[in-house]
């Protein structure tokens, strides 16, 4: 391990916390060094959560722009810079995934007959989905829009697979009951 202050490839080796402090003081080179150190990790974490390489790439760049603006918010007593980055990555990835899922459900289904105006049935389905309790709606978003299996949803939400399956069944039953009444 190199001592702090040594040079590698023309760069002074600083701790992540030191680099983040420099970023907070508008040192672009420090942001570049943090990016080179952590971009692969951030992108991998984002890809695992979003299941979309393009979204992960966008998130990576957005996150480092955010870090440029908020580096002064880092509190070393709460954890390492790596942990700080991963917590932000997880949060932003989940936000993007939820947004993509909502957009998908808002668009379900689309008429195949060339009409842009949704039918009464389409409006009823959209309305019924939005009235589902949040956890049930989230499972439909993850399953139908993000294409996750029950096992993937269970892992992602840290729930037993049986709970996921029973909640999906409940969500579908509630949709059928509500749509059947209409």
Image (spheres, rainbow, N blue to C red):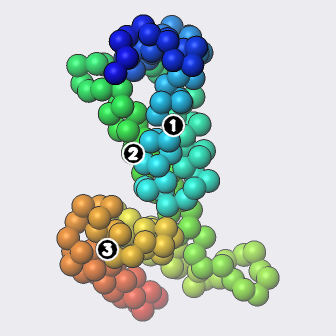
Q: Which residue is mark 1?
A: 39
Sequence order check, earlier mark of 1 and 3: 1
Question: Residue 93 at x, y = what percent?
Answer: 46, 48
Question: Residue 2 at x, y = what percent?
Answer: 37, 17
Q: Is residue 71 left or right of residue 122?
A: left
Mark toward the viewer: 1 or 3: 1
Q: Is residue 150 above or below residue 141?
A: below
Q: Which residue is mark 2?
A: 90
Sequence order check, earlier mark of 2 and 3: 2
Mark 2 and mark 3: span between their CA atoms? 19 Å
For mark 2, give the secondary structure.
helix
Q: Is residue 51 left or right of residue 150?
A: right
Question: Residue 72 at x, y = what percent?
Answer: 42, 15
Residue at 39% over, 88% down: 176
Mark toward the viewer: 1 or 2: 1
Question: Residue 161 at x, y = what percent?
Answer: 24, 75
For mark 1, give the secondary structure.
helix
Label at residue 151: 3
Residue at 56% over, 62% down: 103
**Which corner quadrant of the image does residue 68 belong to?**
top right
Q: Is residue 84 above or below residue 139?
A: above
Mark 1 and mark 3: span between their CA atoms? 28 Å
**Which corner quadrant of the image does residue 134 belong to?**
bottom left
Foreground residue among 173 and 161:
161
Mark 1 and mark 2: span between their CA atoms? 14 Å
Q: Is residue 88 above or below residue 24?
A: below
Sequence order check, earlier mark of 1 and 2: 1
Residue at 57% over, 36% down: 62
| Residue 129 appears in the figure | no
């Amino acid at each position: 391990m190199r001592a702090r202050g040594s040079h590698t490839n023309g760069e002074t080796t600083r701790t992540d916390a030191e680099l983040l402090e420099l970023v907070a003081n508008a040192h672009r080179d420090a942001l570049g060094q943090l990016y080179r150190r952590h971009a692969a990790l951030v992108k991998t974490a984002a890809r695992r959560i979003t299941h979309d390489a393009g979204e992960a790439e966008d998130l990576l760049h957005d996150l480092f722009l955010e870090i440029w603006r908020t580096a002064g918010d880092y509190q070393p007593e709460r954890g390492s810079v790596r942990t700080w980055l991963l917590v932000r990555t997880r949060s932003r990835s989940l936000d993007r995934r939820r947004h993509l899922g909502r957009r998908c459900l808002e668009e379900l289904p689309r008429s195949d007959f060339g009409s842009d105006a949704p039918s009464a049935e389409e409006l009823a389905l959209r309305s019924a989905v939005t009235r589902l309790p949040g956890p049930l709606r989230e499972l439909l978003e993850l399953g139908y829009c993000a294409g996750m299996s029950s096992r993937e949803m269970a892992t992602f939400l840290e729930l037993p697979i049986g709970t996921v399956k029973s909640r999906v069944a409940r969500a579908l039953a509630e949709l059928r009951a509500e749509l059947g009444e209409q």
